[in-house]
Structure formats: C-alpha cells, structure tokens
Amino acid sequence: MASKLHVTRDDFDHLMVPTYAPSSVIPVRGEGSRLWDQNGREFIDFAGGIAVTCLGHAHPALVAALNEQAGRLWHLSNVMTNEPALRLAEKLCQATFAERVMFCNSGAEANEAALKLARRYAWDHFGEDKREIISFYNSFHGRTLFTVTVGGQPKYTEGFDPLPGGITHLPYDHLNALEAQISDHTCAVIMEPIQGEGGINSPSPEFVRGVRALCDEHQALLIYDEVQTGVGRTGSLYAYMQQNVVPDILSTAKGLGGGFPIGAMLTTEKIAASFGVGTHGSTYGGNPLACAVADAVLDIVNQPALLDGVKIRHQHFKRRLEQMGERYGMFQEIRGQGLLIGCAMSPDRPGQARDLMNAAREQGVLVLVAGPDVIRLAPSLIIDEGLIDQGLDRFETAVAAMAEASAEA
C-alpha cells in the first residue's frame, strides 16, 4: 500500500503509540533557527529539538559531512574497526578529561552504560557490597528502566515495578544530605551540572566541589550527565569545565550530533578497563554516519569565538526576559547558563508554563517547558542576534496577552 501524500495530526492518533501528545504544527523544512510547517507558516525556533539542534537546522557543514559519508559507508558492526568512530573518539579525548569513549545512540543509552560501568568497576575493585547509586530528586537521566529509576521523578516509574534496586535519591544542591547518606557502599553519584527537565536548576559551587570531595573520600565514581548541558550549551564544551571539577564518567548526546542520533560515554583508561570484551555493547553504536556528523559538530562548536558567543547571547536573552518579567509580572526568576535558559513562572501562576508555551507557538515562536512552572529555551548556539530579538518580540506578545487575560478574569 502506498504511503499517504499528506500527513495530518489525526494520523498520529491512528498510527502511533500514544506516548507523546504533539502539537498540530507539522514542520516540513528548517533552515538555521527557522522552521516552516505544511502551510508555509514560519516559526522561530527557541526549542532546538530539546537542546539538540545546536547549530540550527540544515547547517551546510553538517549536511556536507552526512552526504560525504553516506556515499562511502553507512554501517559497520563492532566486530570491525571503524574509522569515523575513532576520529571522533580522538577529538573527544583531546578536548576533555577522557581517555576512553564508548558510542551509542542516545542520552539514555549513554547513561545506561555509565551506570553499568560504575557498578562493574566497583564490583571489580571493591566487591559486590559496593553498589549503591545516589541520584537527586527532579533529575532526569533517560527512559530505560534503569535510567528512569535513577532519575528522581516518580511519575516516570509509575506502573513499571519492580524497579532496579540499590538506588537512593536526595535533594539537589543539599550537601549535608549527601554527606549523611554516602558511604563506602556507594559506587557512584550521578548528577546533572544543571538540572534540565527538573526546572533549569543550577547548583552552588560549594555543592559541586563537595560532591567531588565526598566521592573521593568514599571511593565512589562521580558521573556527570551532560546530555543536555554538553557540546557548548552552557558556554564551554562541557559544563564541568566551568564548575572546576572533573568527573570520572561523563555522558553526552543531544547536541553531539547536531540533530543526528548519537550518544557517548566518556571515562578514563582505568575505569574503562572494567568493561572488558562482551560486557556491554550496541549494534548501532559508533555508526559511521552519526560519527561523521558529530565530528563536524565538534569542529565548529569547540572554538573560543563560538563559545564566547553563547555567553553573549545568554546576556541578550536574560536582559529581555527579565524586562518582561518585571513588566508583566509573569516570571519570578530567569535561570540557567549559556543557551539553556529557564523562565520560572511567578508564584501566582502555578502550572501555567505549558499555557504560555502554547500561546508562544500561536505567535510563531517555539519554546519548551521544564516541568509545570518553568519555560525552557534551548536555541541554536549560533542563532543570529537579530532573530533573537524578533523571536522575543513574538514571545512578549504571548506574555502580554496572557497577562491581560489574567487581569480581565
């Protein structure tokens, strides 16, 4: 049977498992920080595919890298040596603390590998009693059963019992709680340097340094989930570089492929040795197409001028958003770092972030939520500053209309 020429939103409900509730907008083309739907309507993209399209849509260098690799080789199993994967791994090791890399296809898979490696390393070096994993409430680490259990949001584990054991959740940015819990039975602490899905929450420098020190004291590994904060999103290649700590394991995905699916786990030679032949794997991990695109992404992103530009754009966004917050009483705080920005709704607007997201879309600008009370912006790292203002003008129209409707109610 031939496929339909015209796709509608109703087709989603008839064909797809209902794990998502997408909007009625169906984009068909993108260029830079703009998208166009089936009807030719233009949208300014401040969502970035949830912090994925770090160089915008259809970036010429990424298109060229994909096309070149597509004409050579699409797939290799991991029983063969893979040139594009090794080139990318070398760049990641040169640019970070890492000495070893393992490729996969998503952030969840990168975290799955990180968590499994931490337990295997502890088992190798300290025995089977060192297996506790400590995570933090409101964290998000993926949707596999292991990673969703490690994530500190019960709504994602409801109905999936029995869940993996040996996992403890603590308040984020509360060092005393961690100090009271961590012990020589702890094999790893996993944390986001900025909580993304949990509300764009940044920890204090004292907390970050304290987590590292407590892990060292108890011979536990520190896992940094940089799936959302990595690849230039905060104004450095990885956020740990601005926090002046070095993790033992780091997970990365989202922006790494600029929109092409790829994830990676980075670690040291000593820790990586616990993943011997056959202990973990991925059929598509290190896919040549994905690695070729990610190689091009790193070449562009890991440049001082681009990373400095992320910080400059942050100030541009923050200034305008704070002005909106003061003018309309819509936001109590502008959070985040670089181009991972959270607009925390005022206390008198509980649960209204999604309403504002929908109103913004009607005005032709795409934003995200990070929980019920925070609007999240994660645009391209190279978005034109004039387009920032144009998008914020549209966003302000939505904010003003929502404020006016509330005043009249």
Image (spheres, grey):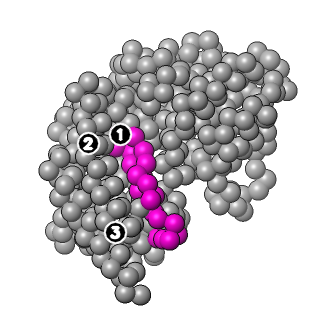
Say which element carries label 3: helix
Ranked by sequence position, the earlier of labels 3 and 1 is 3
Residue farthest along the top direction in this orientation: 270
Could you tell me residue 386's position as x and y percent?
14, 50
User: Dot 1 surroundings within 10 Å: few (below 14), some, or many (20 or more)?
Assistant: many
Query: What range is drawn magenta here?
Result: 332-352
- Tell which of 180 and 27 is nearer to you: 180
What's the residue type where badge 2 is placed?
Answer: Arg
In the displayed structure, does residue 338 sit left or right of residue 114?
A: left
Per the image, is 348 magenta? yes
Q: Is residue 202 visible?
A: yes
The residue located at (37%, 87%) in the rendering is: 408
Quarter holding residue 159:
bottom right
What's the residue type where badge 1 is placed?
Answer: Gly
Up-down relation of residue 147 to residue 199 (above or below): above
Per the image, is 347 magenta? yes
Mark 2 sits on what residue?
Answer: 313
User: Dot 2 surroundings within 10 Å: few (below 14), some, or many (20 or more)?
Assistant: many
What's the residue type where badge 3 is placed?
Answer: Tyr
Mark 1 sits on what residue?
Answer: 338
Mark 3 sits on what residue?
Answer: 328
Quarter holding the N terminus? bottom left
Marks 1/2: CA–CA distance:
7 Å
Residue farthest along the right direction in this orientation: 129
Q: Tell whether label 2 touches label 1 (CB within 8 Å).
A: yes
